[in-house]
Image: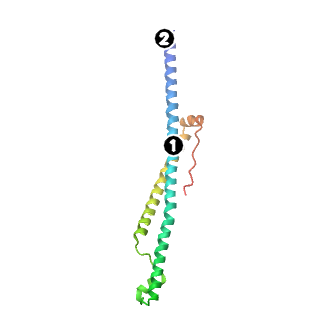
Amino acid sequence: MSESLAVVLAAAGGSLVVLVLFWFTTHNRLVHLRQHISESQRDVDVELKRRHDLVPRLVEVVRAAAGHERALIATLRAEQVPLSGPLALVAERSPQLRTADNFLALQHQLAETEDRLAAARRIHASNVERYNERVQRVPTSLVARAGGFTPAAYADLG
């Protein structure tokens, strides 16, 4: 075998190894990015469920506190306790929630959940953007197309 043929074969073999390594690395990276999209979607779903569970509890605490205040005002009236001045206006026209610990705790949890939900949505959108960019850019798009990777849709995240 001539020396030039050996050089050509070595170069071709080296090129093939580089291509195979590129293919596997790119494929694995696309799988990894696709998993990040699924994971971030689950994080959004968790926060949406948390919000869904908190809102009715918050509404119940508000209703209970308002009902308690209405009952208190009715009791005071029945006992003919005079309500005068600003206290009468507040009591009669817009029963206020007293700063009940439950109400404040739930309100805080809801605000925290909204913040976490916004962060989860941003992360999800970033993951979709990064994945879609990889799937559509050359030369990664060649591996993506052959591997059945298609651009991800931005999910409706509630």
Q: On the image, numbered disc 2 is attached to which residue?
A: 3
Image-based side of 15 in relation to 146, left or right: left
- Sort mark 1 into few (<14), some (14-19) or many (20+) by Cα contacts within 10 Å: some
Which is more toward the observer, 61 or 31? 61
Q: Residue at x 51, y 57 (%)?
A: 49
Residue 148 position by quadrant = top right
- Sort mark 2 into few (<14), some (14-19) or many (20+) by Cα contacts within 10 Å: few
Assign a secondary structure to mark 1: helix
Give the numbered dot on residue 93: none
The C terminus is located in which quarter? Answer: bottom right
Which is more toward the observer, 139 or 42? 42
Assign a secondary structure to mark 2: helix
Q: Is residue 74 visible?
A: yes
Give the numbered dot on residue 35: 1
In the displayed structure, would residue 154 be above or below residue 143?
below
Q: Position of residue 90 (x, y in %)?
A: 44, 83
Q: Residue at x 50, y 42 (%)?
A: 33
In the displayed structure, would residue 136 be above or below residue 121?
above
Q: Is residue 125 visible?
A: no
Residue kind at label 1, given as amino acid type = Gln
Residue kind at label 2, given as amino acid type = Glu
Total marks in image:
2
Q: Position of residue 46 (x, y in %)?
A: 50, 54
Which one is closest to the eye, mark 2 or mark 1? 1
In the displayed structure, would residue 103 be above or below residue 13?
below
> Mark 2 and mark 1: span between their CA atoms?
48 Å
